Image (tube, rainbow, N blue to C red):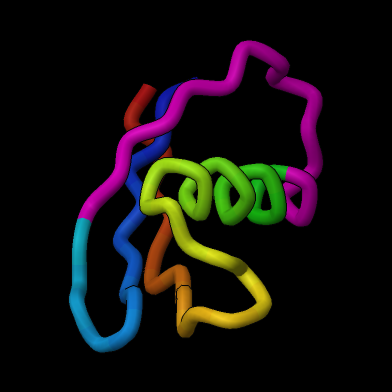
Amino acid sequence: MEYEVKYKLNGTVGVYYINFSNNNLQMRDIKYSIKVELAKYLKCNIEMDKLEILSINKIS
């Protein structure tokens, strides 16, 4: 499954795309995994920076 994630980091809005091969994940697991991967991609700290997920849309 591919997801389009709209996020806000310290006031700046952006879009991130991520794939998951496991279709049996629960939404809370998907949200957490997206946040962790997004933080790695943006090189930010989840606890220190203001990283907010605005929307998650399934693409395929």
Q: Residue 8 at x, y = what percent?
A: 32, 75
27 within the magenta span = yes
Q: Quadrant of the C terminus?
A: top left
Q: At x 57% / y 66%, what residue is drawn?
A: 45
Q: Residue 20 at x, y = what percent?
A: 58, 21
Stretch in magenta = 15-29
50 within the magenta span = no
User: Does residue 20 lie above or below 30 as drawn?
Assistant: above
Q: At x 47% / y 49%, what residue is drawn?
A: 38
Q: Quadrant of residue 2?
A: top left
Q: At x 20% / y 61%, what residue is drawn?
A: 14
Q: Residue 37 at x, y = what percent?
A: 55, 41
- Left or right for 2, reference 36: left
Near-viewer residue (50 or 58): 50
- Left or right for 58, reference 20: left
- Left or right for 38, reference 27: left
Q: Residue 26 at x, y = what percent?
A: 80, 42
Q: At x 42% / y 31%, what residue is drawn?
A: 18
